[in-house]
Amino acid sequence: MIFTKKRVKRILIYIGCIFTFSVCSKKLKPVEEVLGEFENTLILISIDGFRWDYLSFANTPNLDEFLKEGVQSKGIIPPFPSKTFPSHITLVTGRHPEEHGIVSNKMYDSFFNEYYYIGQNSKPVLEEKWYEAEPIWVTAEKQNKKAMTMFWPASEARIMGIRPSEYFVYDESISNSQRVNQILKWLDYPEEKRGKFFSLYFSDIDTEGHYYGPNSNEVNSSIEKIDETIGQLIAGLKSRGIYNSINLIITTDHGMASTSKDSVIFIDDYIEMEDVEIVDWGPACAILPKVDVKDIYSKLLGAHPKLDVYMKGNLPKDLHYNNHRRIQPIIAIAHEHWSIADKKSFNSNPDRYSGGNHGYYSSYESMRGIFLARGPGFKMGYQGPGFSSIHLYELMCYLLKIDPVDNSGHLDSTRIYLTAE
Ligand code: AMP
Ligand code: ZN
Ligand code: ZN
């Protein structure tokens, strides 16, 4: 065959057409197919220490838009103690801390004769033996729906023999923007490899809240930065045409109460420090006496008007905090805004006691966190009452269309936020 100029041009046009057709037919899927693929997908976001009323203080255009099209509750009520690990694990298991075993951020287990602690490079966080309830990502994986976690307390551990299909060991140096990009990358996976449950976690607002207190400029600017991060996620979902197909929950583990170095209960005014081990300073202070328990208890009981003292087994029933070997023999609980310390630790850095804290009784409004949600499962522009975080597991199982395992929550407690079936 003779390749004249005209003939070469025609062949090139023909190849071009075939190429264009094959690319377009791959990219331009019918809309229904895209929706179907992402049906029952859930992104669960925790913004640590985002108090329920923070939104009214800062400039948050992205969260405001999210809200207009979704639902908001008058807060989510954490379990007791309102601390990061007990609360996050309640959120994903529907179990109280005494049921899931993570009764505090710092614990001593007399049977293991070992300590549990959190933070960067924590070893116990990775150990399966500490966790006694099934998180949502395990329930999902067991029912052939993949889970992918861009941080969530304990998501890096094997639990009930199972880990999320993809996960990361906690590393604070991964920026918020990188975390969002990871979620978007996972959403770009082909359907058979893609997850149905995703988690995201941000710690900045909690950190600023501890240092500067809940009503500070530092917390406000941190809220505004997180708003931009959420904006980045929303833009990524919109550009993929999937923003309206996915359910998103934005929530948190607890709120934040202001503290002051003038509101400190000095425990060594009442007991000898050599007589006890303080396993966790609190504000729900976990005390392991080295001498007679009753002796320490009677010295602390009624010692300070802002301190409630309980022997294990006698804490109020609604706290659900009596029945685990990791709960210490005496629990001393400071009232809102108060701290517990010994004079030596206080004097080494008094300013550390002015700022913010959580871990108090969950019934204080200051301990409530945000709950916002949007997507095909949720009503539009609806605001409703606060509810306990124990109910989130059931709600998430419903959205993911998976069967929950036994738990202490109820779907009826959040049904008011859902679109009718
Ligand atoms: P809290 O003061 O109770 O709110 O604890 C917040 C801290 O928990 C964060 O600043 C982190 O250091 C720590 N944290 C959060 N997620 C994890 C994780 N997956 N592994 C270890 N530590 C974590
Ligand atoms: Zn927290
Ligand atoms: Zn905190």
Image (cartoon, grey):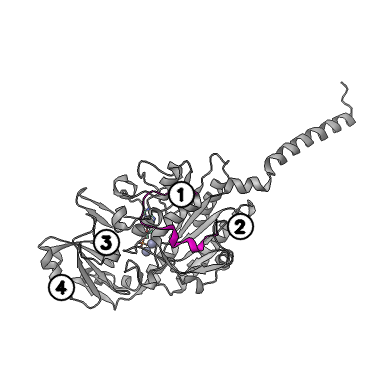
Label 2: which secondary element? helix
Q: Is residue 47 visible?
A: no
Q: Earlier in the sequence, mark 3 or mark 2?
A: 2
The prevailing secondary structure element of the residues shown in magenta is loop
Category of crowding for the residue at label 1, using alpha-carbon neighbours closer than 10 angstroms: few (below 14), some (14–19), many (at least 20): many
Q: CA distance from mark 3 to mark 2?
A: 42 Å
Q: Is residue 9 above or below residue 58?
A: above
Question: In the rendered image, which residue does mark 4 sit on?
Answer: 270
Question: In the rendered image, which residue does mark 1 sit on?
Answer: 149
Indicate which disc residue 235 carries.
2
Q: Is residue 72 visible?
A: yes
Category of crowding for the residue at label 3, using alpha-carbon neighbours closer than 10 angstroms: few (below 14), some (14–19), many (at least 20): many
Q: Nearer the viewer, mark 1 or mark 4?
A: 1
Res. 300 image quadrant: bottom left
Q: CA distance from mark 1 to mark 4?
A: 46 Å
Q: Nearer the viewer, mark 3 or mark 2?
A: 3
The amino acid marked with disc number 1 is Thr
Q: CA distance from mark 2 to mark 1?
A: 20 Å
Determine the residue positioned at 32% across, 66% down. 359
Task: Please give the range of residues in magenta.
Answer: 401-420
Residue 237: % across, % down: 60, 54
Indicate which disc residue 187 carries.
none
Q: Is residue 405 inside the magenta stretch? A: yes
Q: Earlier in the sequence, mark 3 or mark 4?
A: 4
Q: CA distance from mark 3 to mark 4?
A: 25 Å
Label 4: which secondary element? loop
Label 3: which secondary element? loop
Q: Is residue 154 above or below residue 55?
A: above
Residue 221: % across, % down: 50, 69
Q: Earlier in the sequence, mark 2 or mark 4?
A: 2
Q: CA distance from mark 3 to mark 1?
A: 29 Å
